[in-house]
Image: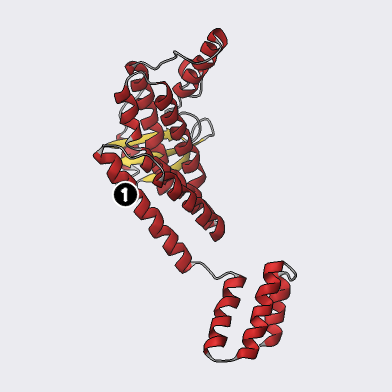
Amino acid sequence: MNYDISDVLSTWEYDRLNNIRKIKGNNGKEKIQIRLPLGIEQFEVDGRPDGKRPYGKESLLEYYKGKVEIYKKKRGNDEGFGLTKEDCSRLYEEGLLYYYRYVLFFQLKDYERVVRDTQRNIEYFDFVEKYAIEEDDRLALEQYRPYIIRMNVLGKGLNYLERKDYEEALRKIEEGITSIDSLPDMENATFTFEKGRSLKLLRSLVEEIIRERPLSEKEELQRKLEQAIEEENYERAAELRDMIRELNRGKISRYESKNRKRQER
């Protein structure tokens, strides 16, 4: 076996602005590669990022969830089950792999997988928060909760924006703002910083979407109504009010409303 990867590196020169790619592996499955200054990292796109199956499970998180279920069957509940410092350390190392991967997915604009991996790590945060024996192990993750919620929400929002579904994008982002804003404060500088930065970024994105999105039919009519009133064209204003009222009642379809406006021009 030739362990020298010089030939591989020479065919893909390092460029920090263009250093991520998707490839098809020898097994026919898609993988992600990132070119580093002195090498290449490779990630599986599904399952655990390194392709391993600890204890025959998809991940260590699934393995420990299984241990909880076994414990419940024996005891009737999960009271007394705990994650040792070593358990939490192993889960933390695994969580980092998913973090590295969803950052790459975000750069590749693969937002569905960003949502999938961030949701997985949120579940990991919740699991450790519930079962960690040592408080330090819980706090080590909780300080980053605003950040991971933000990334999850960005994945959802940007996914809908790519489909031009502005209303759903706004709804998802506003849900994320509420979720982050409602997090109990911690005496932790990282948590405070991440919470403030996340809220600022998401609120700015909401403002940008509202500013840049195409107007809805109702908003178009409302704007024309305001213009008619300003021009003291009260007959036209009355017609526009009727159209808005009918639209609100659902008596005319978008197509019919557009047709009517086209005829009036």
Residue 164 visible to an observer of this rendering: no
Residue 139 in picture, x, y percent from top left: 32, 30
Residue 219 in picture, x, y percent from top left: 57, 72
Quadrant of the image for the N terminus? top left
Q: What residue is shown at x 33% (from left), y 40% (from top)?
A: 185
Residue 241 in picture, x, y percent from top left: 64, 79
State the residue lying farthest toward the bottom: 232
Local crowd size for mark 1, using a 10 Å CA cut-off: few (<14), some (14–19), many (≥20): some
Q: Which residue is mark 1?
A: 196
Question: Observer-nearest residue: 149 or 159?
Answer: 149
Can you say whether 1 is above or below 71 in the image? Answer: below
The answer to whether residue 85 is left or right of residue 168 is left
Question: Observer-nearest residue: 195 or 117?
Answer: 195
How many marks the image carries: the answer is 1
Can you say whether 222 is above or below 32 in the image? Answer: below
Report the amino acid beneath label 1: Gly
Can you say whether 243 is above or below 19 in the image? Answer: below
| Residue 8, quarter of the rendered image | top left
Q: What residue is shown at x 65% (from left), y 90% (from top)?
A: 235
The answer to whether residue 14 is left or right of residue 204 is left
Residue 63 in picture, x, y percent from top left: 48, 18
Can you say whether 179 is above or below 128 in the image? Answer: below
Residue 208 visible to an observer of this rendering: yes
> SS of the residue at dot 1?
helix
Question: Observer-nearest residue: 165 or 74?
Answer: 74
Quadrant of the image for the C terminus? bottom right
Question: Observer-nearest residue: 90 or 38?
Answer: 90
| Residue 33, quarter of the rendered image | top left
Q: What residue is shown at x 37% (from left), y 42% (from top)?
A: 146
State the residue lying farthest toward the top: 74
Specify how the rendered protein is coloured: secondary structure
